[in-house]
Amino acid sequence: MEGGRFRFWYLILVPAILVATGILGFYTFRSSREYTQLGDETIAQSLLSVAQQRVERIERYIVIADGTVFRLVDPNDSSTIDSVWLPQAEAQTPSVRSVLLLDPDGDVIQWASREDKKTRRAFLRTFRQQLLGNLDLDSTEPHVLRHVHVQQEGEESSYLLSYRAFDTRAGQLTYIVAVHDTQYLVDEVFPTMFSSEESTPIYNIVDESNQLVFGPDLSEVGVYTVDHRFPTTLDGWRLQVAPRQAALLQAQGRSRLRGEATLPLMSFAIILLSAIFFIYAAVKERRLNELKSELMANVSHELKTPLSVVRMFADMLRSDRVPSEERRMEYLDIICRESERLTSLIDNVLDFSALEGGKGPYRLKQGDLGEAVGRALEAFRYRSEQDGVEIRLKSATELPPVLIDQEAIALAIINLLDNAVKYGGQSPVELELIAKRHSIDVAVRDHGPGIPADSLRRVFERFYRGPHSSPTRGSGIGLSLVQHIARAHGGRAWAKNAPGGGAVVGLSIPVAAL
């Protein structure tokens, strides 16, 4: 009854508390986030409006310069480029470096430039070979003012071309092309249009590859940076705007968000961790009790078989129903071996109790690991013969001395052999002693199905029993004792799948310092 009531509170109230706390934390966090986003959006809209105004001012400056060029140059008189525009160019259109008059086929009728002779020649060659192809001279609306912004590979500066078609008295179209000096815009025009007062935002201009063209780097400003493209003139360039107090705004936003979200999040975290710990402790306690009950059942079953054998043969000897002296010695030998098996089972349980209590009842002395292996094989011989399993021993000729507890190591090897026989079926079991530079490995290999990948990390856990096609006897503490014994000797236990099938489980014992 008590257990049922506990399960009711466990299944109903704990999830309800978690859900309620989660809902509270979620809506509080969302409200805080929405408030912060609203403030950010207001700032962004204000900055975007400022960016649009500045872009419009720059484009208007360029369009006014274009209009001045078109007013000074007469498409019917090509000489006006040199006689009218060029003398007034520096005062009237300082950003325009060259003006060209083209026929509908793109041939240059007349042109003039404010550059020196060498630069003029280089520009004319560049215009004919690379820039002319960017002009849309076949447009259906030739009289509309158009702009082309071209960034040449390998050159830092770019070319801004403004062009428009005009009707001549001869009845054909003539194009006037004004070439703006973008470096002049960057060096002279932009600084006058972007004030650096503390009450104004920070401006910069970047190109299409996000390379800085003008102004400071704004990459650290984050969400408070807005940008606006030049729609008709400096195509590919963007004006970026950020508040001068962007760092302070970010810090205030983060502080406000933390302040409003921390309390419910902390409450949720505390309740969640408490519930997780409560559930974990309850589940682990229940599982531990189940495993201990299973251990007692398994150990009782394991003890029952050798006890039954000992009792049966003892009764036969006591009632003098032995046909011969030879058979009598065989019965006594069986009793001894079953007694050793009982001793091994009891040692496992006692060592497990010591492991549970955090004690290590091992007395380490310098000795020969081969002797401990021999004792284990002798103790395990009856079991292997009874199951029809061949134990193959392979050992180095000379093994260095080690500090070991002979009884504990023998127990560990017996557990390794027992595990190999259980999961290897009738296949031979190979026991190998490998001498290394700083340790000796005791490896036991079976030729069974091997260890599944998800079980390799768990084979040394207490009570864990790997999956098998048929039920296997055992308590689930044998390999955990192997690991405990190995660590008590300063070594380690390990398990892996062998090439060609089967599993290799073993332990490593450090070599004694001489």
Image (cartoon, helix red, strand yellow):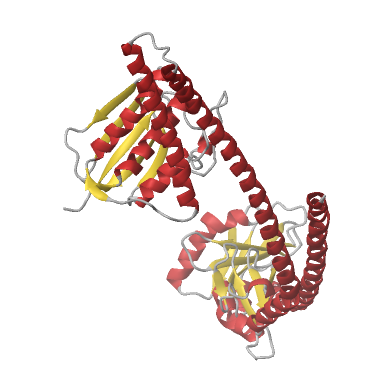
Residue that appears at 19% across and 39% down? 399
**Rendered position, 190 above or below 136:** below
The image shows residue 324 at horizontal and vertical percentages of 34, 9
Relative height, residue 428 to residue 209 (above, below): above
Residue 187 visible (yes or no) = yes
* Camera-side residue of 38 and 180: 38
In percent of the image, x 72 and y 56: which residue is there? 172
Location of residue 284 in the rendering, given as x and y in whole percent from the top left corner:
63, 51
Q: Is residue 97 left or right of residue 343?
A: right
Q: Is residue 107 above or below residue 486?
A: below
Tell me where residue 164 sits by quadrant: bottom right
Give whichever of 501, 206 is nearer the camera.
Answer: 501
Name the spot of residue 143 as percent of width and height, x first. Answer: 76, 61
Q: Residue at x 68, y 70 (%)?
A: 227
Residue at the image point whose x is 36% and y is 28% from the top: 380
Q: Nearer the viewer, residue 406 or 472?
A: 406
Q: Residue furthest front?
A: 319
- The quadrant holding residue 199 is bottom right
